[in-house]
Image: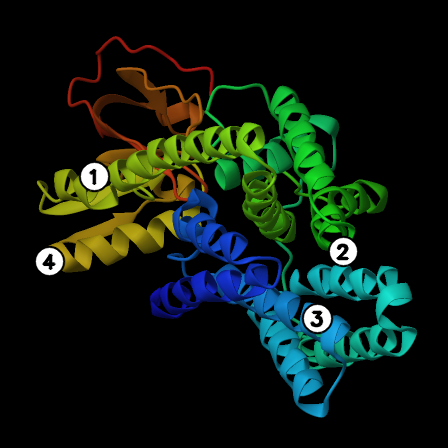
């Protein structure tokens, strides 16, 4: 299931190089480096979602738009642009805002390139998005269509999402306050924009600053997820590559600044990738292996129930054991042997040695058997508890 993401994520590296090489050869090399090493793109270039395909499509479209504006629109180039945008929109619908940013980029550059080319790019972007939008509309009309949980927009939620995107894209350290991180990333982006030629500033500026502000103006929910700011991440990565290339070309003093920036990015990415490779998206197999010590592992889970049950079932099948989820209605008659406490990655979870759980009239005491962390942009951290056999055991009640 991850194969497509791995393929598209890998292809995004030469696509980034080709897009930025139109500015200069150094920018192309640096863009390849950024998209190959940046934790944001490594993570989503190995996850069974559509973001890797969308990233590839944005980079292809960005290069094609630049070529059309500089060299003129041909039937071949417009068809290639339509194919890139259509593919990207089928990969993930957030491609729509990236297409809008590209069309606006063309419009803002029309004085140098001609209004006709800008209009052609805008028309292609709109028409190429329609097939995926039609499929989505058809699916949304189905009676069993569901919308996941949505968190209302707030300053803290917005800072968490955009700050997390900037942290994963440029390697900012963990532990920095989200608002402070937003300010630092914004100042860095403005500094890099200042050293670029005018025509190279427009798309990164729209992606990094314009689209997040549009999210605020529209009051979009669930902005705490960095992946919902993927277009901003692509713009920020291109800005880092092309901005550092501009500094490198500007003389010895600025060359040192470019080297310092690239070194800082590389150190940050190395730390993030080390955590990612160590913790992964969750050490689920280790937890299920403990559950398999019992002939029939009956368990309860407190969060993300559907995903967690699917993951437990997968690893239980590989181990050749039976793992049965226990609902609250079944708890009193047949209490679970294990309790899985599920938390988001890097969360400050409660890992108390003992805890109680279950309906009020038949609560059970549980003893911690292990904590299995996850790190980064997705996955879950699990804390596994086993029911104590002594019903008189003293327990520490959590605040959950």
Q: Residue at x 33, y 19 (%)?
A: 351
Q: Which residue is mark 4?
A: 320
Q: Could you tell which of marks 2 and 4 lies nearer the N-terminus?
A: 2
Location of residue 368 (image quadrant): top left
Residue 254, horizontal then vertical, whole percent: 58, 31
Q: Could you tell which of marks 2 and 1 lies nearer the N-terminus?
A: 2
Mark 4 vs mark 1: in front: 1
Residue 35, horizontal then vertical, whole percent: 46, 52
Position of 16 relative to 241 (above/below): below
Check contact, mark 4 vs mark 1: CB within 8 A: no
Name the disc covering residue 199, or none: 2
Q: Which residue is mark 1?
A: 287
Q: Could you tell which of marks 3 and 1 lies nearer the N-terminus?
A: 3
Q: CA distance from mark 2 to mark 1?
A: 53 Å
Q: CA distance from mark 3 to mark 2?
A: 12 Å
Q: CA distance from mark 2 to mark 4?
A: 60 Å
């Amino acid at each position: 299931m991850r194969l497509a993401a791995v393929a598209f994520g890998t292809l995004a590296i030469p696509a980034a190089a080709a897009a930025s090489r139109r500015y200069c050869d150094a920018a192309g090399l640096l863009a390849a480096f950024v998209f190959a090493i940046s934790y944001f793109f490594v993570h989503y270039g190995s996850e069974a979602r559509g973001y890797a395909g969308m990233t590839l499509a944005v980079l292809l479209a960005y290069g094609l738009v630049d070529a059309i504006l500089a060299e003129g629109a041909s039937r071949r180039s417009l068809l290639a642009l339509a194919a890139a945008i259509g593919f990207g929109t089928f990969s993930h619908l957030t491609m729509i805002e990236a297409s809008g940013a590209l069309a606006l980029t063309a419009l803002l550059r029309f004085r140098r390139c001609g209004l006709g080319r800008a209009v052609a790019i805008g028309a292609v972007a709109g028409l190429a998005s329609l097939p995926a939008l039609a499929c989505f509309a058809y699916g949304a009309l189905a009676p069993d269509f569901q919308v996941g949980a949505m968190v209302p927009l707030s300053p803290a939620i917005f800072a968490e999402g955009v700050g997390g995107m900037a942290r994963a894209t440029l390697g900012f350290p963990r532990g920095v306050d989200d608002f402070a991180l937003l300010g630092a990333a914004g100042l860095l982006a403005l500094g890099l924009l200042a050293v670029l030629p005018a025509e190279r500033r427009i798309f990164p500026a729209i992606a990094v600053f314009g689209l997040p502000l549009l999210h605020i103006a529209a009051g979009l929910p669930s902005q705490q997820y960095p992946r919902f700011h993927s277009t901003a991440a692509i713009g920020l990565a291109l800005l880092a590559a092309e901005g550092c290339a501009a500094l490198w070309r500007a003389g010895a003093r600025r060359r040192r600044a470019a080297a310092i920036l690239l070194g800082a990015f590389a150190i940050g990415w190395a730390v993030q990738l080390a955590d990612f490779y160590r913790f992964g998206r969750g050490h689920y197999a280790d937890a299920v292996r403990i559950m398999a010590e019992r002939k029939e592992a009956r368990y309860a889970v407190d969060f993300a129930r559907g995903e967690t049950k699917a993951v437990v079932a997968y690893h239980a099948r590989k181990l050749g054991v039976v793992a049965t989820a226990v609902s609250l209605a079944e708890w009193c008659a047949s209490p679970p042997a294990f309790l899985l406490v599920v938390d988001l990655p890097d969360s400050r979870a409660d890992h108390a040695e003992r805890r109680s759980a279950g309906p009020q009239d038949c609560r059970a005491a549980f003893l911690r058997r292990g904590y299995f962390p996850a790190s980064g942009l997705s996955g879950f951290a699990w804390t596994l508890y086993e029911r104590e056999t002594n019903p008189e055991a003293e327990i520490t009640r959590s605040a959950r």
